[in-house]
Amino acid sequence: MPGLDGRKRLRVGGPPSGTGNRFRCPTGRGARAVLTVDRLTKRYGALTAIQHVSFDLHPGEVLGLLGPNGSGKSTTVKILTGLLQPTSGDVLIDGHDAFADLPSYKATIGYVPEEPHLYTYLTGPEYLRLIGRLRLLSESALDDKIDRFLKLLGIYDDRYQTLSSYSKGMRQKILVAAAVLHNPRLVILDEPFSGLDVTAARVLKAFVRALADEGKMVVFSSHVLEVVEQVCSRVVILKEGHVVGHDSVDQLRATLQLPSLDAVFAALVAEENVEERCRGLLAAMKA
């Protein structure tokens, strides 16, 4: 169907769009969409990074955010985490503007960034303790949580080592623990499998599904289409800053009569002949 910007979008089915802390989670069956992203646009001067991006997210859902490099995924994630202000459009949580009370909104979020920017002079437990204190967790609960996370993630034996000596995968485990330490209601994962070994990746996939089973809302941004297909309830596909597909994986496959999410992604996003490019790369290598 054509969007308000005149571009063609594919949206089939899906749920309808849709407060101490005004961002407290509603209870009971039939609760409306808790996170609503409405016509988000972000411009940097003459460059439009995203335009009219809209979707919603319910408790118990994992929403996949897909797109090639330059499609606007990172910009969308940074707005969702409060790191960027949109030029126009809204991020609503329980019907309230998230940016009107940004500290309260951020307190509900757990975020694993694409790049692991850590204080590498700290040990793993020291870093998690810093995050826990910033999240206002009690000291007694914090120490117990940290020990449990380190043991379950297989890095307890390295607890006295500084993060500068950690491998990329070990640092990624610390980021995951830091993101969920305070039991957030909205978890935003940006390429969370980066650097993880096969076993850790399997655990994280199961954990993402378990978060949804616990009623959390999860935004999952990744280039690994196979994993997105396995863990996500719905996907939003971006191209050049616009939504070109938004539905469940099964419905997208059925609508386009394609066998996999990879094929759906190629049909909606890819504009080049992959085999032709491969032949070109081989020719360049042999020249």
Image (tube, rainbow, N blue to C red):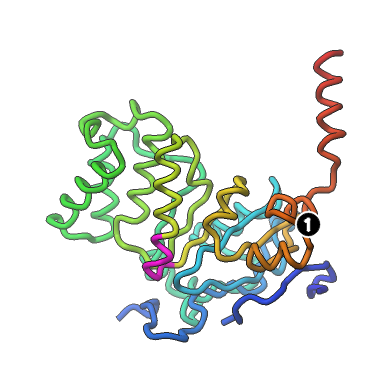
The residue indicated by pointer 1 is 268
Which residue corresponds to the image point at 46% horizontal and 80% vertical from the top-left?
94
User: Which amino acid is tagged 1?
Assistant: Leu
Task: From the top left corner, tell me how far across and down residue 274 is, in percent.
Answer: 81, 38
Which residue corresponds to the image point at 77% horizontal and 53% vertical from the top-left?
269
Q: Residues within 10 Å of mark 1 (few under 14, many from 20)?
A: some
Q: Is residue 205 visible?
A: yes
Instruction: Specify whether 192 is left or right of 49.
Output: left
> What segment carries the magenta color?
210-216
Task: From the top left corner, tell me how far across and down residue 267 is, in percent.
Answer: 80, 54
Q: Is residue 41 magenta?
A: no
Instruction: Specify whether 11 is left or right of 59.
Output: right
Which residue corresponds to the image point at 83% horizontal and 14% vertical from the top-left?
286
Q: Is residue 11 shown above or below 67? A: below
State the image quarter where residue 281 is shown: top right
Q: Quadrant of the C terminus?
A: top right
Q: Nearer the viewer, residue 192 or 53?
A: 192
Instruction: Specify whether 23 is left or right of 247.
Output: left
Q: Quadrant of the N terminus?
A: bottom right
State the image quarter where residue 103 is shown: bottom left
Instruction: Specify whether 3 is left or right of 200.
Output: right
